[in-house]
Image (cartoon, grey):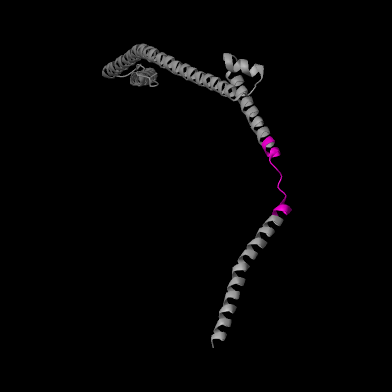
Amino acid sequence: MNRLFRLGPVLRARKAQEDAARGAVIQSRQEIRDAQALVKRRQLDLAGADAPTEGTARAMVASMVARQSLAASLSGAHQMVDDAEERTREKVAELADAAKRHRAVEMLSERHAEAVRRHDLTVDQNNIDEIAVTTKARNTARGVDTAEERGNTLRTGAGSVADRLSAAGRAAAEREGIARETANTVAAQRPQIDLADARQAIDAVRDRLSLVAKRPAEAAELDDEGNSDEDHGSR
């Protein structure tokens, strides 16, 4: 089974698109706040520019023109707020669409991860079953008797993973106990060696070897004495 998700690059691209759309929404909402702040400033400016009640006609006309300009600026600020809100709605729709597309690929990734996890569990289960069957066959070949419950577990593969591991541990402990008992039995059947008797035997062998070594030396001395007597006789 391929453990690598083939749509990984697509998933990363969809995630980047969603992040970009979210950033655009945040920026458009900031534009709305800026436009609303501009509206407040224009309203304050218009409220502060009261129409003059006295003065020349030219001054009054100039004041009226200024108020009209402020009113136009205020209307433009309101239009900016409306435009910013419209752009924000569009950005939110784009963000929702990007999130849906990202979620679709993300669900495929989650399904792939779940399939990999199930595959790994199946492989582990098969390995445990194989170990259990192999252990039972080995014990049967060695003539090792096991408990009926553990035998049923190893034979049928029933029980949880923990139960099978526990059964395998008990089997190993039983094999170790049987091996220890066999070693103790063999050690008990070995003949006991008396170290004192062995020491006496070694001393006896050494004495015989020393006697054998002395005999050629004595014979050589006798030959030397005979040769010396012959020399004296000839003289």
| Residue under the image location 62 percent in, 64 percent down | 212
Count of numbered badges drawn on the protein: 0
What residue sits 59% from the left and 18% below the top? 154
Would you say the magenta stretch is mainly helix, strand or loop? helix
In this view, the residue in front, 115 or 76, is: 115
Going 58% across and 82% down the picture, which residue do you hit? 229
As drawn, the residue found furthest toward the bottom would be: 235
Q: Position of residue 4 (x, y in %)?
A: 38, 21
Residue 202: % across, % down: 67, 57
Q: Which residues are magenta?
A: 185-198
Q: Quadrant of the N terminus?
A: top left
Note whether 196 is above or below 58 in the view shown: below
154 in magenta: no
Q: Quadrant of residue 76?
A: top left
**Can residue 45 be seen from the camera position used here?**
no
Quarter location, residue 67: top left
Q: Position of residue 116 (x, y in %)?
A: 44, 18
